[in-house]
């Protein structure tokens, strides 16, 4: 059954809605309203309290069965012991999907797992799907839906974020807001009693608003199916996974935390590789890659151009490119064009050193030339903050030139500097142009895009 | 000759001071005043113009010889062709040290190098030292002296930053302000005609305000002397070096940029290792390490404690610790104390999982216990932002407990989350407690401290 109702519900009931700020049943409803959800919202509260929010008054229903309208999605926030009854009622009401926020199930042990299975049986009987339990909710930015008790102001974009951990998932939502990573969706999968990573990957595979998927994973139940689906999806869209527990001690700690098998990491590693999954070792690395993978087109060839105003950062980027197996374009006939944009002591050999004197015109001209030449397949624009050119003006130039070129080849940016550099980086990221505070991070993100693109080519050849 | 006058001059002349905002000779004088330099400032300008700055009026002298007082340091900003004469006059005046900002010397080729040597000969004749030429200046925060045309509001601290590149050096000054890295000094060494890295290392070795030194290096002239001095200094204080040009292509690009030898990187690598120098591969890594190395005491043993509220980030930190060769303390008798600060489903095995329910008391109690136990030698406090505890409150707890303990063992912090997490990280860094947005970065910084500390122990045994 399609997960359409999880991401584009026409109406949402909150079962366990509360009139008290601080309660989860209040926070979810407030996020829905504040983030601009345009469908209908039906609070359900056993006492039938009136809920006031942002000056609007909501009548609440004592039972979902009292709602005089169809309900696509019901977010369940009631204590664990009431959940079975709620699921049954939702089935009778014809609800399509049930994100169950409530905890106190499988994460507590065998008894809880049994109850989870019973919930899924009830849901199955009615053709209903369950997300969770033990989750913080779901976000889908194209529908302006934030049905979580996490932060409100998620930045819209093209990355889908799936988290098995609730605490870390909410923290990562906050991180994406701070770091200007645009998201299409956030899904807290929690105990994965029914909807799991594979189901979600299948949805995102055909979702036009999602270009890349980032999963924080502690373990999978049906590994074979996950890998099969992941491989299919990877042929269309890149998947990045963070899965801790690489080291022996880390795997042991993970086992005691999640109940997943220790020592299985090598199996995961091999399976990820085979499925085209990009495994990131840290949160920072994962989001660095995700910025580039969710925003940029694939390169049409191997020729990378590095444009820089600083010899030092040019060398750093070159080191990273060589270590990551990227190819710096070498054809001097083609590269000579950059000599037009630099003083005589500059170097048009790749990395192209526009020199510390490089201002707006030097960058504008060289970026435009690199975008226009079909033999140049990917571009890294590096800038070391100087008094000659305000980094924010550079950001404007890059945004304009890249948009005018039709965004047909990957372009990443790195700006080293202080507060103005940080503002320029934010400006670029808000426009979906991946920008970083260090040259190596830009190059490594581009390298992740190349890795995925090359894997795909090999698959298609086989 | 001591470099005391370069860092604690009683009086400073600016030769080439200007009354026009936008000029370097204006910017340096303004930085000196704005940053609160308390010695005497003497502008020198051939036209003898009056310079108004922040409402104060400065009479300028037509020649340094006209100044009716001793001058310790003269910052030279005049065009290259006038520099020889200025150096001669400074010698006659009895100036002790000459930072020469002016460019147009050795960086242009052999002719320029020859002129540089002549400048040094003149200086030698008078017992004067030259910094540069082709530099952006010098900062020493304990003397409230910012004699650069870089950013003003450098954060005081215990890291000395030396940069061979001017453009990158200024960008890095901006970075330290943005990222709350406290500095004792910034020195732009430029063409290193006289004062070089080795001289500066010797000064910082005995400088009470400096605990660690970070060098951005493109090449050294007298490699043997540098390595000898670096080794001596490393026995007292850690040295971190960023030197790009590791890869073949990167080394070639570096050679064309700086004139240093390509292919010499392996020699540098071996020499760095032997001298106890910590080589960072990226700017981010260098400052991550520098935060910890310039602020924390050495560990008295190998036993690391990881405190966390999130299983996931605890596992990530454990992976990093194992990969970096750090030892998680294992004695359950000692670790049991942490059970007092967690619910029954927490885990006092290291990594200590205080659970997502951990609030102020759980962190306060467990940090205090870890600081108090002499068998626990280093501590990593991890926090995944939740609604239970505002990260800024956690920062306050850490600052209070660490200060009350007398800061006798290394403690690093990682907080994953959004804007409040970022604020908490800044609060900690402003207090000199190294804090990072990712668990692995905190662990790797601690590992750098351990690497240096272990190298020292081996040296002393030999």
Image: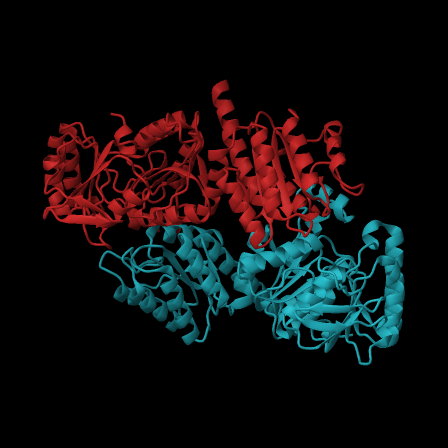
Chain colours: A red, B cyan
- Which residue in the rendered view is the most extreme toward the top? A461
Residue B212, by quadrant, is bottom right
Q: Please state which of residues B413 and B76 is positioned toward the viewer in this rendering.
A: B76
In the rendered view, does B104 fall on the left or right side of B177?
A: right
- Residue B17: x percent and y percent? 77, 65
Residue A218 visible in rendering = yes
On screen, residue B22 above or below B185: above
Q: Residue at x 42, y 54 (%)?
A: B419
Q: Is residue B3 visible?
A: no
Looking at the image, residue B368 lies above or below residue A362 = below
Residue drawn at 45 percent across, 33 percent down: A273
Between residues B148 and A359, which one lies in front from this camera angle?
Answer: A359
Does A222 sit left or right of B32 as displayed?
left
Where, quadrant-wise, is the N terminus of chain B in this rendering?
Answer: bottom right
Return the x and y of residue B363 as percentages of the image width and height: 33, 64
- Using residue B397 as the reference point, say whether residue A362 is left or right of it: right
Total numbered labels: 0
């Amino acid at each position: 059954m399609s997960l359409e109702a999880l991401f584009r519900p026409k109406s949402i009931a909150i079962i366990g809605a509360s009139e008290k700020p601080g309660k989860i049943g209040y926070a979810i409803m407030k996020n829905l309203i504040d983030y601009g959800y345009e469908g209908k919202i039906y609070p359900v509260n056993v006492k039938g309290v009136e809920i006031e929010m942002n000056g609007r008054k909501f009548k609440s229903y004592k039972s979902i069965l009292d709602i005089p309208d169809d309900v696509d999605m019901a977010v369940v926030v009631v204590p664990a012991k009431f959940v079975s009854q709620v699921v049954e009622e939702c089935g009778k009401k014809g609800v399509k999907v049930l994100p169950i926020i409530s905890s106190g199930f499988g994460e507590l042990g065998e008894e809880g797992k049994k109850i989870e299975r019973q919930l899924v049986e009830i849901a199955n009987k009615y053709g209903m799907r369950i997300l969770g339990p033990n989750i913080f909710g779901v976000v889908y930015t194209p529908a302006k839906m934030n049905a979580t008790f996490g932060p409100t102001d998620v930045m819209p974009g093209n990355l889908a974020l799936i988290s098995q951990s609730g605490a870390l998932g909410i923290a990562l939502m906050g991180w994406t807001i701070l770091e200007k990573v645009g998201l299409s969706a956030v899904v807290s999968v929690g105990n994965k009693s029914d909807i799991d990573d594979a189901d979600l990957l299948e949805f995102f595979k055909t979702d036009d608003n999602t270009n890349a998927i980032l999963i924080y994973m502690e373990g999978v139940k049906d590994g074979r199916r996950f890998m099969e689906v992941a491989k299919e999806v990877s042929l269309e869209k890149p998947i990045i996974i963070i899965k801790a527990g690489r080291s022996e001690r880390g795997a042991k700690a993970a086992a005691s935390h999640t109940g997943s098998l220790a020592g299985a990491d090598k199996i995961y590693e091999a399976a990820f590789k085979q499925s085209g999954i990009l495994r990131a070792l840290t949160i920072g690395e994962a989001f660095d890659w995700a910025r580039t993978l969710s925003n940029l087109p694939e390169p049409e060839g191997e020729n990378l151009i590095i444009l820089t105003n600083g010899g030092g950062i040019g060398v750093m980027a070159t080191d990273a490119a060589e270590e990551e197996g990227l190819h710096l374009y070498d054809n001097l006939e083609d590269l000579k064009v950059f000599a037009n944009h630099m003083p005589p002591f500059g170097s048009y050999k790749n990395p192209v050193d526009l020199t510390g004197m490089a201002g707006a015109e030097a960058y504008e001209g060289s970026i435009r030339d690199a975008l226009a030449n079909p033999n140049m397949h990917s571009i890294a624009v590096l800038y070391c903050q100087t008094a000659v050119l305000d980094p924010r003006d550079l950001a404007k130039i890059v945004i304009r030139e890249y948009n005018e070129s039709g965004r047909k080849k990957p372009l990443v940016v790195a700006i080293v500097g202080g507060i103005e550099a940080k503002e320029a980086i934010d400006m670029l990221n808000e426009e979906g142009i991946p920008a970083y505070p260090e040259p190596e991070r830009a190059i490594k993100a581009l390298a992740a895009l190349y890795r995925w693109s090359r894997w795909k080519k090999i698959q298609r050849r086989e």
